[in-house]
């Protein structure tokens, strides 16, 4: 047993004999090394090993099948049972635009649901994922850039429930060295160099700069994570003690005087704790959405206003009424404001004016543009042109979701996420009957405002460049 395998053994705990371990294997370097190390341990300690591979359906079918076949072949070589889970093409992308999530977040949610289901099916004691120290550092940088609070700036936990991460102490260089030692090949995800995704921007652009100009940054970031972990634990304890939620008819409530008598950071943490409580209660009904959280900026804005009578914060609704602050899962409004339309391919259609509060129907023409400059299609290829009562859209990104505009919707504009009011010239007032948000797999792509005079204003992120 070499040092890599010995470290995995220590991470799995003392009593491994007879335990069932389900390893999530993508075919990449990290999970391939983890699987190889586990297979060696199986011979020595008598653990029971299974593998699950998830095909997400978000990459070219040939490449995705190649990954799955490579995992199958390795599992046969190592004599490990392998279950392949295939998610239909377009399902994750459609879910991402429908719920305003990034495609990576949606894929991760589906992946964990698949792992948990397979773990239950085989009676696994532990589900193993191949997160490394590099993944933990990338996560921390991403969360810093997103403005996360203390809990978001903690290190990836080695264990959460039945999820265990046995190679979290290893760097990518350690992984590659072990694979070389074992003479094992691995698959490379073609999207890993696509800097359209934030993780890849951090990995391919930001980290090389930090390595060059701030050689000790990893030690500093890990120290920050440790400090934030202590701060998060303290805030959680103080919040639970001073701002406890009461359950009543499917919602959580707290007296106004108690809530507003606390420091603002405790108010914010109480809302997040309430979101977690509500999510835990509905996790069995909709595990994909489990763990969704409101944006801290939107929450902070609501708190500064003293909490309006009703504030929608993504997955939850915050209300102030009858001397109480209440928190409940967000529910769709009535049919009239429940408008949503998923468009999977180019074409033309007409949206009934009655659905939008307009006298005339809104005509949509959706056309697919060729890749710009011979490069991969990105959000830069999104265009929206307005002609009379018609919006002509040209995009290389599908599916597209058209839905009613929500408070908190932000459009990527000039490199920053901005609301519609931030983008329009100061003092501009739109006599709008309806505002529609257009989403693609990367978030809000455009905003269409229909006015009482029949005119339409369309603003799309490509126009900012």
Image: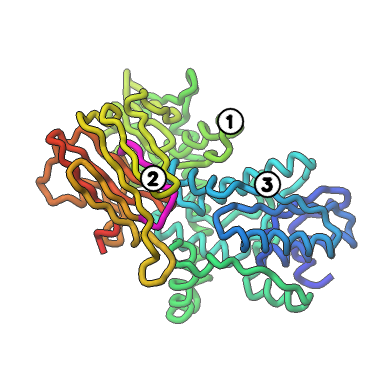
- Residue 38 tag number: none
Circle 2 crowding by C-alpha within 10 Å: few under 14, some 14–19, many from 20: some
Q: Quadrant of residue 412 in the image?
A: bottom left
User: How many discs appear?
Assistant: 3
Question: Disc 1 or disc 2, which is closer to the eye?
Answer: 1
Reading the image, the residue beneath label 3 is 115
- x, y percentage for residue 409? 32, 44
Q: Quadrant of residue 263 in the image?
A: top left
Whichever of labels 3 and 1 marks the residue nearer the N terminus, that label is 3
Q: Residue at x 40, y 49 (%)?
A: 346
Question: Disc 2 or disc 3, which is closer to the eye?
Answer: 3
- 369 left or right of 143 in image: left
- x, y percentage for residue 109? 56, 46
Is there a contact, CB below 8 Å, between mark 3 and mark 1?
no
- Determine the CA span between mark 3 and mark 1: 17 Å
Is residue 219 placed above or below 461 in the rendered structure? below
Is residue 219 placed above or below 117 in the rendered structure? below
- Determine the CA span between mark 2 and mark 3: 27 Å
Is residue 136 placed above or below 279 in the rendered structure? below
- x, y percentage for residue 152? 48, 52
Q: Nearer the viewer, residue 399 or 35?
A: 399
Reading the image, the residue beneath label 1 is 285
One can see residue 427 in this view: yes
Circle 3 crowding by C-alpha within 10 Å: few under 14, some 14–19, many from 20: many
- 81 left or right of 54 in image: right
One can see residue 261 in this view: no
Whichever of labels 2 and 3 marks the residue nearer the N terminus, that label is 3
Q: Residue at x 27, y 57 (%)?
A: 413
Tag 2 secondary structure: loop
> In this picture, which residue range is highlighted in magenta?
395-405
- Determine the CA span between mark 1 and mark 2: 23 Å
Reading the image, the residue beneath label 2 is 295
């Amino acid at each position: 047993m070499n040092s890599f395998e010995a470290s995995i053994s220590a991470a799995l705990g003392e009593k491994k004999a007879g335990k069932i371990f389900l390893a999530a294997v993508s075919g990449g370097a990290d999970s391939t090394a983890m699987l190889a190390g586990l297979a060696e341990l199986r011979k020595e300690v008598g653990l029971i090993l299974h593998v699950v591979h998830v095909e997400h359906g978000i990459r070219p079918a040939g490449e995705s099948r190649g990954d799955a076949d490579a995992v199958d072949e390795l599992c046969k070589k190592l004599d490990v049972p392998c279950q392949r889970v295939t998610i239909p093409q377009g399902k994750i992308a459609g879910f991402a635009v429908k719920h305003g999530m990034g495609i990576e977040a949606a894929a991760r949610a589906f992946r964990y649901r698949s792992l948990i289901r397979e773990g239950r099916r085989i009676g696994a004691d532990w589900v193993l994922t191949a997160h490394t120290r590099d993944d933990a550092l990338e996560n921390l940088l991403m969360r810093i850039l997103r403005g996360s609070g203390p809990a978001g700036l903690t290190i990836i936990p080695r264990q959460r429930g039945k999820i265990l991460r046995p190679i979290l102490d290893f760097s990518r260089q350690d992984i590659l060295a072990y694979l070389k030692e074992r003479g094992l090949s691995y698959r490379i995800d073609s999207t890993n160099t696509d800097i359209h995704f934030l993780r890849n921007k951090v990995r391919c652009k930001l980290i090389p700069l930090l390595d060059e100009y701030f050689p000790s940054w990893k030690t500093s970031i890990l120290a920050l994570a440790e400090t934030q972990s202590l701060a998060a634990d303290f805030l959680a304890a103080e919040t639970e003690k001073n701002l406890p939620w009461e359950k009543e008819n499917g919602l959580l409530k707290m007296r106004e005087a108690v809530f507003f008598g606390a420091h603002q950071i405790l108010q914010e943490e109480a809302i997040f704790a309430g979101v977690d409580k509500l999510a835990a209660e509905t996790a069995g009904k909709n595990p994909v959405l489990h763990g969704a959280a409101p944006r801290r900026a939107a929450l902070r804005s609501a708190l500064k206003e003293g909490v309006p009578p009703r504030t929608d914060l993504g997955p939850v609704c915050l209300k102030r009424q009858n001397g109480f602050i209440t928190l409940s899962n967000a529910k769709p409004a009535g049919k009239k404001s429940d408008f949503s339309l998923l468009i999977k391919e180019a074409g033309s259609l007409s949206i009934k004016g009655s659905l939008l509060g307009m006298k005339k129907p809104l005509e949509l023409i959706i056309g697919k543009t060729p890749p710009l400059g011979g490069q991969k299609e990105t959000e830069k290829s999104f265009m929206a042109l307005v002609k009379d009562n018609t919006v002509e859209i040209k995009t290389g990104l599908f599916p597209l979701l058209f839905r009613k505009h929500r408070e908190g919707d932000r459009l990527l504009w000039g490199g920053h996420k901005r609301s519609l009011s931030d983008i329009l010239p100061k003092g501009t007032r739109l006599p709008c009957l309806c505002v529609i948000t257009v989403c693609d797999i990367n978030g809000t792509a455009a905003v269409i405002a229909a006015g009482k005079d029949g005119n339409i204003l369309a603003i799309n992120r490509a126009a900012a460049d």
